[in-house]
Amino acid sequence: MMRLEKRATPSRAWSVATPVLAVLLTMIAGGILFAMLGKDPVAAIRTIFWDPLFNPQFAAYSRPQLLVKAGPLILIAIGLSLGFRAGVWNIGAEGQYVVGALTGAAAGLALYPMESRLIFPLMVIAGALGGLLWAMIPAILRTVFRTNEILVSLLLVYVAQALLSSMALGALRNPQGGGFPGSRNLSQWASSANPELIAGTGMHWGVVAAFIAVIFAYILLQRHMLGFSIRLTGQAPRAARFAGVSPRRLVILCFGISGALAGLAGLFEVTGPAGQISLDFAQGYGFTAIIVAFLGRLNPIGILLAGLLMALTYIGGELAQFMLGVPAAAIQAFQGMLLFFLLAVDILTNYRIRWAREAS
Amino acid sequence: MTGSDTLLRVEGLTKAYPGVVANSEVGFSLRPGEVHALLGENGAGKSTLVKMIYGLVTPDSGRMVLSGQDFAPDRPATARRAGVAMVFQHFSLFDALTVAENVALGMEAPPPMRDLARRIRETSATYGLPLDPARIVGDLSAGERQRVEIIRCLLQDPKLLIMDEPTSVLTPQEVDILFKTLRKLSAEGTAILYISHKLEEIRTLCDHATILRRGKVVATCVPRDRTARELAELMVGAVLTPPARAATPKGEVMLEVTGLSAPSPIPFGTALKDIRLSVRKGEVLGIAGVAGNGQDELLLALNGELRSAPDALRIGGQPVGDKGPEARRLAGLVSAPEERLGHAAAPDMTLTENALLSGAIRQKLVRHGFIDWTKVRAFANTIIRDFDVRTPGTEVAARALSGGNLQKFVVGRELSQGSEVIVINQPTWGVDAAASAFIRQAILDRAAGGAAVVVISQDLDELLEIADSFAALNEGRLSPPRPVAGLTVEEIGLMMGGAHGMEVAHDAA
């Protein structure tokens, strides 16, 4: 009989090994899935994990996409991970991402067509503030009225999407766009553009911000008292109150940081890769970032790697659809498996398996 | 009567857990109507032994004979059917249900509620255990809850009743009531297996005693023929020195609480009502009380987890009633809550991190918000060295430590901060005798060094040993503190609220 026995201290070796093990198990199970669909499993796995980076034919196009996709995922996931560690569940990053893009774009467009180096920084601040304020709604409702922040933050995503549509069709619509929905193209206006900084890498200001966020979060959690309070609250809420941590302050802070980072991600997206406020601007980065946060075990370095891996499976998944005709649903199932296996093998960090015959 | 002169015989019972042999070749026997004590320190193996008799734990080897037949219960229901009943130290009752509903939940085929209520009233009258079947359990005192458990057992008409540390939640008067009940049961032929480490109690109540140490039977005796001191030495296996204390002159008032009232943050908790106390430099104030009379709430109100009016609490003259734990630490008050894992310490964090948890402010372990881990580790090492915490190092999770070692760490962390006011709830709960003596001595040393100390405890002996003045909590009210010298047990009992719920008995009679 197999038994799980709790470890006295969590195993450090396993906490590093479990993500690798999870990826391997996903490859095996995914391979079986693809084989059952009549596709060559080895080719499918290679198309997803290898071709985006090294295929001589596509890599030039798909390699920069890696950072373009990973940037917002990492930036949002870093913010979310702080809250998740403290037991504060912001599920509405997608909404904060959209609102950040809207407020940032609006701040810039209000000054159009002025040319100034100050416009882009102003938009960055407006974007962060927009996301922060949108996140304050669930935070304040929770601290004052004890509402469930999961529900409120999630539902506000749909409000934000409705707001996006109304803005794309109304206030922010391009007056010279011939009546089509969507704002002016911000990436083509020098004052607001968020260009590729090094040609062929996909690196833009949002990716830079993501890397800075990783470093910032790492230091916060390792060295700063706020990071300690966050970890303490998540692990032992009563001990945190004993230590003197104010749970309300922490809820406001966690929502504030995650909202601001999601807002920033939205702003960098709308001024760079997306270029404009459009009806289909929301691509689900805010939801995928939740997966990235857990895939990276709520650890900044882990999130950096998980964001890159997730971006890879997205690009590779599209490639597999396009090249091998693997259905989109199978790709989604494959990504789901990754999360499933990660959470499943995670138990080995805190428990060890004992094989013992049951004494009866 | 069964006719045979032995009700239960236990032979060579052994049970090992990974890393520890809880019981090794334990044997004893019990006659009908006998009150038999199982005596031993925490961790001596008393609980494991009775859990085997009650069918909660299966022994590795050995055998039991009940009323002349082989007895190997595989679960509590089997043991109950054979006539074995048990009252646990921790009650398993539903706060939101009535007494009768709780009793019905423990029965395999409960009778209609009206009949059950009548039987509860009859049994409670017969055995002098006042209890109203219609009351909600959440509103009962600890002593009354215990009566629910006892009556639940008595309704099964047991041949053997096991009681695990029953008096730890009772006032002296309630203990008297319980003992009368137990003597009546014994006279009717019910054998009682009585677990305790309170020696005087055992000398008054029990016919025989089996003494366990580290899982082995080290002695059997008739407790009345022995002195409490002899029993203690058998139990501990060594001669213990009582803590030494110097008579220190008491200085100015360091902690003053006036008219502190606060609702309980705990469901079915006890609200604090108009608490008044003052503690001077060098003084130890002992606060007794039956569990659940506001001890937890009092600690929270003193350490700042529960706020009150600014003037309700002063530390060194400074009003801090509306301030949180950090501000109170800064003002000079440190505290150690009762629950070690989860409240006083974060189970999954290392000892270093747990040293930071309450040491950050007074030990100046943080500068501009940044943690100086080298300093924190040094602080953790100081605690480990000074308080003899047995651990492989500082980078071990708190939950990996044994209860006694973690308690030494938690108490040590607070006592090492050179603060003027120290509040400790249950300093030696679940800690072995040697570690208890160590902790009490450390508390006295800090008092001798000029600290004002508040010790909340349910162990009267402990309080009488270390306290200068004494008060008791009863339903959230604190009796006026009195000097320990000259207090009688009778007076202490009355301060603790006498016998809870006696008025119900008059109604029922």
Image (cartoon, helix red, strand yellow):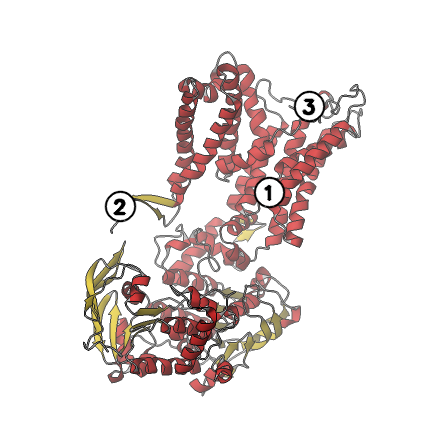
The earlier-in-sequence mark between 3 and 2 is 3
Residue B249 in sight from this viewpoint? no
Residue A27, image x, y percentages: 41, 26
Residue B188 in sight from this viewpoint? yes
Instruction: Determine whether label 3 and label 2 are within 8 Å by CB.
Output: no
Q: CA distance from mark 1 to mark 2?
A: 42 Å
From the viewer's perspective, tell me whether residue A123 is left or right of residue B25: right
The quadrant of the image that shows the N terminus of chain B is bottom left
Q: Amino acid at mark 2?
A: Ala
Q: Amino acid at mark 3?
A: Gly
**Subunit bearing disc 2:** A
> Does residue B198 sit above or below B416 in this rendering?
below
Q: Secondary structure at mark 3?
A: loop
**Which residue is under mark 3?**
A275
The earlier-in-sequence mark between 1 and 2 is 1
Residue B473, image x, y percentages: 52, 76
Q: Marks 1 and 2: same chain?
A: yes
Q: Secondary structure at mark 2?
A: loop
> Does residue B353 sit above or below A184 in this rendering?
below
Q: CA distance from mark 3 to mark 1?
A: 27 Å
Residue at figure coordinates x 39%, y 27% from the top left: A28
Depth check, front residue: B384 or A151: A151
Q: Amino acid at mark 1?
A: Asn
**Which residue is under mark 1?**
A90
Residue A95, image x, y percentages: 65, 36
* Residue extending furthest toward the top: A57
**Which residue is under mark 2?**
A356
Figure quadrant of residue B76: bottom left
The earlier-in-sequence mark between 3 and 1 is 1
